Image: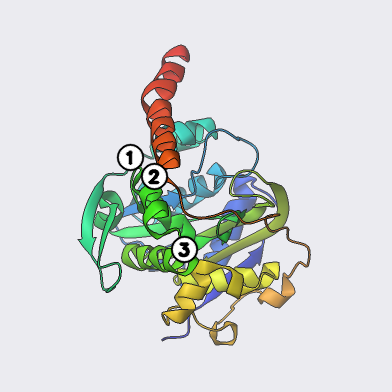
Amino acid sequence: MNQPSVSLLRAQSYDRASLRESLETLLEPLGGMVAFVKPGDRVLLKPNLLTGARPGKECVTRPEIVYCVAQMVQEAGGKPFLGDGPAFGSARGVAKANGYLPLTEALNLPIVEFHGKRYETVSDEFNHLLLSKEAMDADVVINLPKVKSHVQLTMTLGVKNLFGCVPGKMKAWWHLEAGKDRDRFGTMLVETARAIDPDLTILDGIVGHEGNGPSGGYPRQLSLLAASANVFALDRAVLDILNVDPTIVPTVMASQRMGLCPELNHIHFPHLHPSELQISDWQLPTNLVPIDFGLPRIFRSTFKHLYIRFIKEPIQAYAGR
């Protein structure tokens, strides 16, 4: 394994001018955006668009991050588009609820909905995965996760964010099929991340979401930006900043077991080292809840998703005319 680099930086606010400057500094030791995006590339920007139900609670990647990254992609000659597969509702509906549309419209940034196709993978256990065709067909994937605690998986960072590339309610069925075993579920998430193979991960940690996340917690100022071409190394570094034991995070444990995640002392940190950013009081969930979904929950979840996407969102769009 080549030594991966994880760029870590302090950043205080989402003011677009200062954020843009911070992102340029963050990416400079990695070669800048031009190291990842070539003229004409179709570039998927994959934020965390978890929910439209809690705007302002820092449950999603901030739109200012997406705006600045999209702008940098365009300046490198790429053609960015925004996509995600929210658990409830559409990507556009969740983006709209979280204030994305003025910024996406300012850049003519398309928002796409994900559609599934089955792909063969290198895994023996998960050798065919239903994944977003839009993600798999993109020339470049830029993963834009949010730092959040998670009541099922302890933490959600770069690897878990790529579960959004599993389209529609297939995510719920994975909870049913693999959720009874935390290690197996973590392995499935790592295999999904390995199949998507993001070219670049830029993590939004200026304000994180701690406690009973991914949506039931509360905002926490962290003043952190992180970037890496290696999503597994980035997740490992962020756990060290938060003083979270890697052995209690299934995605990190699985990536280490599979030889995809380096030890901390094998990661190059061109700006700040995790030890210079550490905090001691990051709040994890009060209690972990089971990962697996029973059939009744699957049916309720599917009904809620269909209701929001095909009834609630169209009514809100019509009422806003």
Q: Nearer the viewer, residue 130 or 98?
A: 130
Query: Which badge, 3 or 1, is on the more N-terminal residue?
Result: 1
Residue 185's spot in the image, x, y percent? 43, 63
Q: Is residue 263 above or below residue 12?
A: below
Q: How is the image coloured?
A: rainbow
Q: Is residue 241 left or right of residue 135?
A: right
Q: Amino acid at mark 2?
A: Gly
Is disc 2 in contact with disc 3, using a CB cutoff of under 8 Å?
no
Quarter of the C terminus within the rendering: top left
Q: Is residue 269 above or below residue 234?
A: below
Tell whether label 1 touches label 3 (CB within 8 Å).
no
Is label 1 in a helix, a strand or a loop? strand
Is 5 on the left or on the right of 195, as rendered? right
Residue drawn at (47%, 49%) of the image: 47
Q: CA distance from mark 2 to mark 3?
A: 15 Å
Which label's residue is closer to the chain start, 2 or 1? 2
Q: Which residue is mark 2?
A: 85
Q: Using the image, tell me which numbered label, if any, was put on residue 113.
A: 1
Looking at the rendered structure, the secondary structure element under dot 2 is loop
N-term-proximal mark, 2 vs 3: 2
The quarter in which the N terminus is drawn is bottom left
Q: What label does residue 159 carry, if any?
A: 3
Looking at numbered disc 1 in the image, what kind of residue is underneath it?
Answer: Glu
Asked if labels 1 and 2 touch by Cβ distance under 8 angstroms, the answer is yes
The 10 Å Cα crowd at callout 3, few under 14, some 14 to 19, many 20 or more, is: many
Q: Is residue 247 left or right of residue 95?
A: right
Picture quadrant of residue 215: top right
